[in-house]
Amino acid sequence: MTNPLDLLGINTLRFLSVDMVQKAGSGHPGLPLGAATMAYALWTGHLKHHPANPQWPDRDRFVLSAGHGSALLYSLLYMTGYDLSLDDLKQFRQWGSKAPGHPERGHTPGVEITTGPLGQGLANAVGMAIAEAHLSARYNQGDYAPIDHRTWAIVSDGDLMEGVAAEAASLAGHLKLGKLVCLYDDNRVTLSAGTDITFSEDRVARFQAYGWQTLVVVDGNDLDAVNAALVAARAETTRPSLILVRTHIGFGSPEQDSFKAHGSPLGIEDVSRTKQALGWPLDPPFLVPAAALEHFRRALARGEQAEADWNSRMRGYAEAFPALCAELQGRLRGDLPAGWDTEIPDFPADEGGIATRVAGGQVMNAIASGLPALFGGSADLDPSTHTALKGQGTFNPPLRVGENPQGGDAGGWSFAGRNLHFGVREHAMGAIINGLAAHGGYLAFGSTFFIFSDYMRPAIRLAALMGLHVVYVFTHDSIAVGEDGPTHQPVEQLASLRAMPNLTLIRPADANETAVAWKVAIETRDRPVLLVLTRQDLPTLDRNQYSSAEGLRRGAYVVRDAPAATGKRNGLDLILLASGSELTLVLAATERLQAEGVAVRCVSMPSWDLFDAQPQSYRDEVLPPAVHARLSVELGSALGWHQYVGDKGEVLSVDRFGASAPAGALMREFGFTTDNVVARARRLLDAEIS
Amino acid sequence: MTNPLDLLGINTLRFLSVDMVQKAGSGHPGLPLGAATMAYALWTGHLKHHPANPQWPDRDRFVLSAGHGSALLYSLLYMTGYDLSLDDLKQFRQWGSKAPGHPERGHTPGVEITTGPLGQGLANAVGMAIAEAHLSARYNQGDYAPIDHRTWAIVSDGDLMEGVAAEAASLAGHLKLGKLVCLYDDNRVTLSAGTDITFSEDRVARFQAYGWQTLVVVDGNDLDAVNAALVAARAETTRPSLILVRTHIGFGSPEQDSFKAHGSPLGIEDVSRTKQALGWPLDPPFLVPAAALEHFRRALARGEQAEADWNSRMRGYAEAFPALCAELQGRLRGDLPAGWDTEIPDFPADEGGIATRVAGGQVMNAIASGLPALFGGSADLDPSTHTALKGQGTFNPPLRVGENPQGGDAGGWSFAGRNLHFGVREHAMGAIINGLAAHGGYLAFGSTFFIFSDYMRPAIRLAALMGLHVVYVFTHDSIAVGEDGPTHQPVEQLASLRAMPNLTLIRPADANETAVAWKVAIETRDRPVLLVLTRQDLPTLDRNQYSSAEGLRRGAYVVRDAPAATGKRNGLDLILLASGSELTLVLAATERLQAEGVAVRCVSMPSWDLFDAQPQSYRDEVLPPAVHARLSVELGSALGWHQYVGDKGEVLSVDRFGASAPAGALMREFGFTTDNVVARARRLLDAEIS
């Protein structure tokens, strides 16, 4: 039997949630009613946190992967004393409220991460647990453990069905993340039906196959059983834990165990019936018994004590290991270490040049030693994406005697390693680096072929929505991939990602633009930055002859202008625009046309969003409104280029899928040749004159 | 010991593949060397096919999910007698070749589906097995089994790591797809490393947890053991089978068992060493021993006999069940049954109106009875997306005694049901409907919220690349979703999908446009069609006052024109453009402005790609080049609208993430009000005049 005070607390969570949903006229009462006991157990008995300081670095992280149960989370935050009032709860789902429909990081104190799209939260939690494992391996010394916390998540049937969660769970088991605990709200009902119609797998056996500890609580209202499972999960050190808690969606309501309890207010009558069924006063709504509040609010004193203990330990750590401590503190604050960029190479002019993926790899390695927060890897493609941080070790559980890796850079496996091998799991990679960034202390990156950005798009979107500072390194960026063919050749990916708000996309044109792009990627703090790099070699421009690559910072810049006083009109006849690998092409066309006396300006345009953020004066300087003959050249969809070339301009683009052939053949067949650029430019000039 | 003829055949596959990769200078030799034995066993002893007629409907389907091993597939196709020559193999990965870098459906006879992006093929195979299960349940009668074939796939480590495959495998186990067999090329090496660095889960236990039969072959070169496992898989009737075949990547080459053997030509020297190691003549390349060819080509006679037997059975079936037989034959040909569209409602004018998702549901149900090929479902959202086909049953294995479903429309579970419940598995849904379409006999649809199209984007892209006729029903199409907030509110999805080649996207503006959109979706045969529908109610326009909704077929049409001779210039002062829910808004603004004497034209623009496909004359008729004052209004990213509004036009769009609030509040805050549209229009007119 649950004791009365505990039951009071549990029911307070339930009915605050029910009343929030009812007042808002929308939301999800089913999960809070069913999962209140496990949430109560975790938040009052196990979660290490300090509601008065949600930024305390060594707090446990809590992820409500089933983000539609946000009312439960807000109830927990209010009850334990975060900066969220009862009035805020009454504004659930209203314009400007601190209690939006799904939990939003940065919006509500105590919300660690934005959730709602299913599967993401579990994978984010894996990222947070990786964050803790690496920081503790790198910084904890002897008796000093500045980093020692757990990651907890509440996950749902829907989470467990999503592929991104499956990928992340497999990796978490492989990585032996012993401080990750997922409470699975096993209510066997989803939005549309019972899980018997779609989801009859043996979930316990699946997670055991991944290498997880599994624990089962047969009655989710049995507080003692939930607590016992949480204790067992905390005792485990080398396996993540899944606690399968059998619950009942909409517990106590007339629609209990039905999908109808999932996502709509109960309605006034059923709210009353549910309160009656669970012995709760019908009025007032938003009732918070003083005893319950007092019990929850003990979290404040516990949290204060925990943080004070930590501060005291940190003082000792700072004395014993001043350099490490300073480095850790700087990371946790998000500082950029002084001189982080001094090793970045200045690439000499080179006609043959190198691929921007190769240049990018050299730049990353130049940054890595001065920026310990740089951490990440690729989805099984680092020999191709050139994203390995050399000499920085492999993030993997230490090998035990008798374990003999077959391949790869097997040396130096430990949690202190900074190269994280994601396997062929792009989506989990995206969600895991979100978890790293949300945890704090990281500049996390993930890498794959540009085409496979499609696999991780939901995670990229969440990074943009949260304004997380992560870096994507996407290589093999156009049909110039060549022989691998259309399944591997990006066409629409540039346009589709340019459409996404709050994301900086940069497609540099040579090695030195790549170096500047990486500087922008590191210095940008409030959003993800996406680098789009070539497979093929590109000439490294002679910047004595062309403008400095620093122009990339403004998104677009004049890389070579028309010689003074050559133009037929306005001093300028024509503007050629290109990004990435096509800059070489338009420069060659520029030279041909200039030799014919045409006043051509050549603009490198690696980043639309950086350019759009410039003042109108700069934009007009680069693209003078009076010059109508403009041709853009890019190995991607035309979509969006019209706003830069204007009504009288033209777009040379790729608006069909690619093909399997050597890159040179594809360039000819798709019209990406100097001859064709020159011919298209001449047609534009002729049209202007006629 | 493998007998000499078998070994000759296996090595022929190996070295044709090696020589193809070597001659092309790119490709993947590792998989063919390791997996040749299982491929040989399957294709010479178990696969039911007729190389002279790759379209024979009752053939087994074969999917090379590990599409990078395409050289192996082309070798099999050539050796068994498909319309692919040795010269074609020598043109591997060249422009215009029938042997592109990854297998491409429609490009090479015998290639069932385009693969390469990992995980997709396994999920496609699940779709094909579903296709077979449903057709056989619906059409097979007593002794007559017009449909009785298996689906086979070769899958790799990478496939098993991908979330989309995990989703599909879980669903396949739930659905008890006994005629699906996956051969798992367990070579423990991926592109970048050994799997020990990322993938240590117990794969056998995982698939058992999904409800699969698992079989293990400890030596992938042991032909007898492979055959025994294939026999066991064929004997299983209620579980899909995973045959884990332990192989060695790059078998016989100096780089055997190393990731270096994965994806690059071996090089001339190592090609020789490999041939020596396996006892193969060094010259000539592309050696095809006559005995091997003769042995493989027996597939032609076997296939001819199998097809003849089937034709004979079909004649009996046609006599016994003429109506069913005619229906089946029509489906397999892809015919549209006469009168399929006669029940589609004509929606009466209605100020209050209905949501286009609701109208869409009514239209689908009106089509369903006359179009048995319509088959599909949603990723756990059919109560919200309104995509349930009423009275058409649930596609699920028949319930056995004692099984008691908890919820949903549990009645009528059988493989004859046409409502497929995908669970919360959007990505697998996309890949599964690709498999249904590729199988033939289906007009498959998949449905979820528009925001979650991001989860299934790689599958949508493959549908577009293959030109598969599938229909996506994506509802809740803008920030007007309201309270669920930015995680659930599409912003950039319209632009990002418009960027994709070979995809028709339609966002209808009212119930009658929705009906026409569905007609277009059914009648389009060569590409996927994506319907974007609202959550919120929209007025049903009075088509006596406005142009017919049939105008939707041309992508954009004048829904209300300026009264004759009212305009200040050119007879037309201003054009307002909108799609979907915003048409109502611009119509209201049109009325206000027309009342003020402004000559406004209102254009409904539900589909850019349909409009772009119209002749220039029609496009100029709708958007006369002389009219520069144009304002587009759409609840999505601005990207791309400039090409329609022009340099002097304006775009009212949403270029930030949404927010959690009631839809009405969001419309006000984001400027989607009649007042704001009118004000923006007036500013445009003022700018024109000044």
Image (spheres, coloured by chain):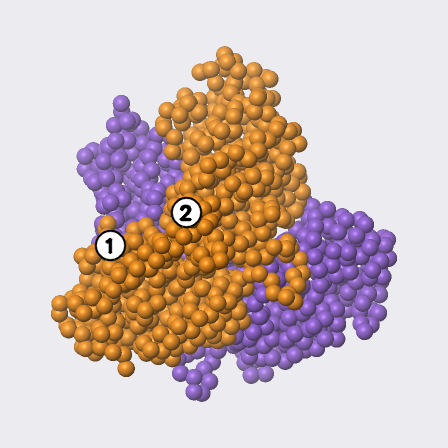
Chain colours: A purple, B orange
Q: In the image, residue A362 lies at what x, y percent?
A: 34, 63
Say which of B238 and B39 sits in front: B238
Residue at mark 2: B329
Q: Residue visible at 41% across and 62% down?
A: B150
Q: Residue visible at 59% across and 57% down?
A: B413
Q: Chain of mark 2?
A: B
Say which of B47 and B204 sits in front: B47
Q: Residue furthest bottom?
A: A401
Mark 1 residue element: loop
Q: Is A354 above or below relative to B184?
A: above
Give me the disc on residue B21: none
Q: Residue furthest left?
A: B283
Could one spot residue A223 in this view of the protein? Answer: yes
Q: Earlier in the sequence, mark 2 or mark 1?
A: 1
Q: Quarter of the image for the N terminus of chain B: give it.
A: bottom left
Q: In the image, residue B668 lies at what x, y percent?
A: 64, 36
Mark 2 residue element: helix
Give me the disc on residue B83: 1
Say which of A55 and A551 sits in front: A55
Q: Callout 1, which amino acid?
A: Asp
Residue A308: which quarter of the image? bottom right
Q: How many marks?
A: 2
Q: CA distance from mark 2 to mark 1?
A: 25 Å
Q: Callout 2, which amino acid?
A: Gln
Q: Are tags 2 and 1 found on a single chain?
A: yes
Q: Residue visible at 48% across and 53% down?
A: B139
Mark 2 and mark 1 in contact? Answer it, CB < 8 Å: no
Q: Residue visible at 37% across and 49% down?
A: B466
Q: Is B679 above or below relative to A15?
A: above
| CA neighbours of label 1 inside 10 A, class few (<14), some (14 to 19), many (20+) | some
Q: In the image, residue A87 lies at what x, y percent?
A: 76, 51
